[in-house]
Amino acid sequence: MVLIVGYGKSGKSAEKVLKELGYETTIIEDDRLIDETKIDKLLCGLSFIVVSPGVSCDSKIIKCAKNMNIKVIGELELGYQLLHGKVIAITGTNGKTTTTMLTAKLLEEKNVFVGGNIGTPVSSFATKTKENSVSVLEVSSFQLDSIENFRPNIAAILNITPDHLNYHKTMQNYLNAKLNIFKNQVQSDFAVLNYDDAILKDLKLTKSKTYFFSTKKEVNGCFIKNGCIYFKDTTKIIPGYYRAKKIAKISGIKLLGEHNLSNCLCAITCAIISGESAQIIEQKLYEFEGSTNRLEFVTDIGGVSFYNDSKATNPSSTICAIQSMKSPTTIILGGSDKGLIFDEIFKMNSPLIKNYVFVGQTKNILQKTAEKYNIKNYYIAESFYQSVHLAYALSNKNECVLLSPACASFDMFSGYEERGKCFCGIVREIKKNENAKHTSKT
């Protein structure tokens, strides 16, 4: 008997694969609602427990299980144990989804599977993989917190800034969870690190071979020089790159912002280590248009451009989005409270942010922080629907509306995907109404 704690996508996928493997399962949808007097009975006779991402290690049922020496693993660990072929794992505070999708794109000539925190549980495809497969996985701090044997052949960290402190409690705990990605690597494995990140630059890894990527400096790995992307291997492990080799021109990349350029360098590094040719990488890189909910262009209404960046669930991600904008912008901020601080958004006071619209559980915190920095050009919306309409009303021709909330979505939505879908739906409704007005006038 296997107990599954949490019954979202990960829990349902774990249940399905476990039943296929012949296990009986029992489900706890919400560990917070369990009767404490029944925990011992529930744990009796279990083979192991599978927890979904986000289930706290402080959960009473998890603590009791560990005290009884019952094995507790995450859905990522379960899926990994069933995988065949090579594994590329990508984590970081921001940019995980874009980098994961781009890495898979660069390697699509191979037998590639994509999953993890990106929305497709690893256990949902693990049994379909073969020895020649490459699984490209986005992994979160929640997932890495509960690994046991998870060992990616290539492990990459994009950046580290504060996030999920309501779960991890301290920045050190959050960092330690991220660093678990290297926990089981051996000398034949590879680590890919962002040289431009102060924490990652000086990270000392003794087991795996380390390559860096940087938008600012020539490194052992991937870097920018004279408007082009180069890769160089000073350790002489990867044939063909002992001298710097040009991979692509920056001008051919469709993604916005320097943060996305950094994401591209990471993906290229993973692809080169995986043995993909520079020619294929260049071609696929130019084709890639980004991922849904990440600075995704939605539509244009009367000269106002709408961008969906719903995946921006922390301030550092939103700052990257702001820095990517090229025209006066009205930004929609707010959502559920993860215990984060928003000072940096308002301290930078970007001249391109024409208006701020605050919504959701954190709207009052955002208001107080804005006033702390003497920012007056903010507006409060009572609903998400109203926030989008208000942002449009505040915008003129040749300006932008940007949804980049800097917060999680669970106060109003089931996740950032639903929030992004709702935003796009409201925008298209506005466009339809505007077109109807124009037609009636004509």
Image (tube, helix red, strand yellow):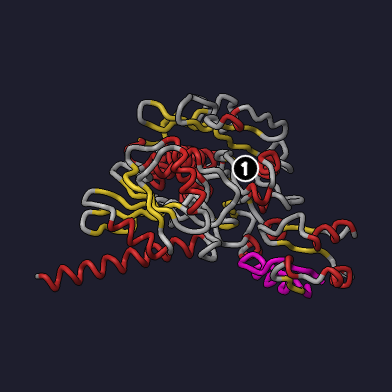
Residue type, numbered disc 1: Ala
Above/below status of 430 relative to 294: below
Left or right: residue 308 versus residue 99 is left
Front-lying residue, 58 or 199:
58
* Quadrant of the rendering where the C terminus is positioned: bottom left
How many discs appear?
Answer: 1
- Decide whether residue 298 is among the magenta residues: no
Q: Is residue 140 left or right of residue 246?
A: right
Q: Quadrant of residue 403?
A: bottom left
User: Depth check: 103 or 95 in front?
Assistant: 95
Residue 428 image position (x, y, % from top left): 31, 66
Work out whether residue 322 or residue 277 is closer to the camera in this orientation and state it: 322
**Can see residue 111?**
no
Identify the secondary structure beneath mark 1.
strand
The N terminus lies in which quarter of the figure?
bottom right
For label 1, the crowd category at 10 Å Cα-Cα, with few meaning under 14, some 14 to 19 and many 20 or more, is many
Reply above or below: 367 against 43: above
Residue at which label 1 appears: 155
Image coords of residue 263 (percent x, y) = 48, 41
> Which residue does the image show at 34% across and 47% down from the upper left?
355
Q: Dividing the picture into quarters, in which one does residue 83 lie?
A: bottom right
In the image, what residue occupies the spot 69% across and 66% down? 6
Question: Which residues, given as a range, are shown in magenta?
Answer: 1-25
Residue 214 seen in render: yes
Which of the two residues, 408 or 151, is positioned nearer the viewer here?
Answer: 408
10 left or right of 433 in image: right
Q: Position of residue 280 (x, y in %)?
A: 42, 45
What residue is shown at x 64% (from left), y 47% (from top)?
A: 165
Q: Is residue 17 magenta?
A: yes
x and y percentages locating residue 117 in the rendered image: 59, 56
On screen, residue 389 above or below 211: below
